[in-house]
Image (cartoon, rainbow, N blue to C red):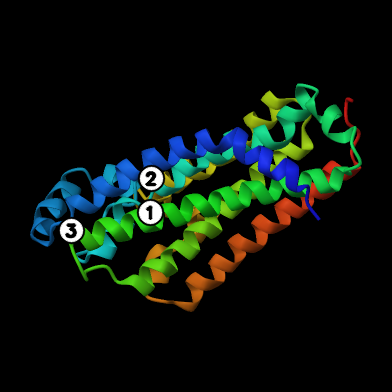
């Protein structure tokens, strides 16, 4: 059960934040798709060879020859993980810890609704807002691809990659939501969430630089997202995708249960 009134209120309070991030992602998505040119493959390889560490860190060491490989190489390596991660950090803090920190939770709990109902509503809002962002980005990429390169985008494989991307978003948002449910101090909650996400992104970037740091991929959850494996429909990629969804959902459930049982400064 959720509180529908609170759910609607969160949409009114946070739609501008969502639109801002969708606007940024629109700019990058359309720009990257429009840059695709199969004849530029050799030029990009030369650039990658001149700065191998930089290209590898951003997951662009080998962007392939097809439109889908180009998009996943340039967009899904960092841009569609780092920018939504910032949105997740901000929103997670707004939905729980900030209410407790500024005293607004007293107002929410003064009505007939229980703690569990409130925190489940906040969790559902975060997940559905991320789903809205994902669907929007998918539509932007498909529309831009169809306008500029009609028929070149492998649709089924592209959708599989986005199933994996959403799993990564669920994982990162679950961790940040859990932090927001544990700490009363808004600064502490956003600090912990930010530290975990920044750590995950940086370690992933370092692990891609060369064989010397390759084993670091086992120290970050970002490595569970295998875009190339999902394009090829490999079973291993689907297993790690399931792990991302599972861990993310467990973090949400843990956050709800912890918030229901802990003492609040109200």
Instruction: State the residue position of label 3.
Output: 148
Which of the two marks, 3 or 1, is nearer to us in this view?
A: 3
Circles 3 and 1: CB atoms closer than 8 Å = no
**In the displayed structure, does residue 21 sit left or right of residue 108?**
left
Q: Residue at x 84, y 45 (%)?
A: 258
Q: Residue at x 37, y 72 (%)?
A: 157
Between the residue at mark 3 and the residue at mark 1, the CA separation in whole angstroms equals 20 Å
**What SS does tag 1 mark?**
loop
Mark positioned earlier in the residue sequence (3 or 2): 2
Q: Which residue is more in the foreground, 77 or 161? A: 161
Mark positioned earlier in the residue sequence (3 or 1): 1
Q: Quadrant of residue 179?
A: top right
Label 1 Cα crowd, 10 Å radius (few <14 / some 14-19 / many 20+): many
Task: Reply above or below: 191 against 168.
Answer: above
Circles 3 and 2: CB atoms closer than 8 Å = no
In the picture, the disc for residue 204 is none
Q: Quadrant of residue 196?
A: top right
Q: What is the quadrant of the N terminus in the image?
A: bottom right
**What SS does tag 3 mark?**
helix
Instruction: State the residue position of label 1.
Output: 76
**What SS does tag 2 mark?**
helix
Instruction: State the residue position of label 2.
Output: 79
Circles 2 and 1: CB atoms closer than 8 Å = yes
Residue furthest top as drawn: 102
Label 3 Cα crowd, 10 Å radius (few <14 / some 14-19 / many 20+): few
């Amino acid at each position: 059960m959720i509180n529908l009134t609170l759910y609607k209120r969160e949409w009114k309070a946070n739609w501008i934040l969502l639109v801002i991030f969708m606007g940024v992602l629109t700019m990058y998505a359309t720009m990257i798709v429009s840059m695709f040119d199969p004849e530029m493959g050799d030029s990009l390889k030369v650039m990658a060879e001149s700065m191998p560490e930089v290209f590898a860190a951003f997951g662009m060491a080998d962007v392939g020859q097809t439109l889908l490989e180009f998009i996943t190489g340039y967009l899904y390596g960092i841009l569609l993980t780092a920018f939504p991660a910032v949105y997740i950090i901000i929103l997670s803090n707004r939905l729980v810890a900030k209410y407790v920190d500024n005293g607004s939770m007293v107002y929410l709990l003064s009505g007939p609704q229980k703690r569990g109902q409130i925190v489940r509503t906040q969790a559902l809002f975060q997940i559905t807002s991320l789903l809205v962002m994902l669907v929007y980005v998918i539509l932007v990429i498909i529309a831009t691809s169809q306008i500029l390169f009609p028929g070149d985008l492998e649709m089924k494989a592209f959708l599989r990659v986005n199933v994996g991307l959403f799993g990564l978003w669920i994982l990162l948002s679950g961790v940040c939501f859990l932090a927001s449910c544990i700490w009363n101090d808004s600064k502490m909650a956003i600090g912990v969430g930010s530290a975990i996400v920044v750590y995950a992104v940086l370690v992933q970037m370092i692990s891609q630089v060369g064989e010397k740091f390759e084993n670091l991929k086992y120290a970050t959850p970002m490595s569970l997202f295998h875009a190339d494996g999902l394009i090829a429909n490999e079973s291993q990629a689907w297993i790690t995708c399931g792990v991302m969804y599972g861990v993310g959902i467990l973090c949400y459930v843990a956050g709800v249960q912890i918030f229901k049982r802990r003492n609040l400064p109200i």
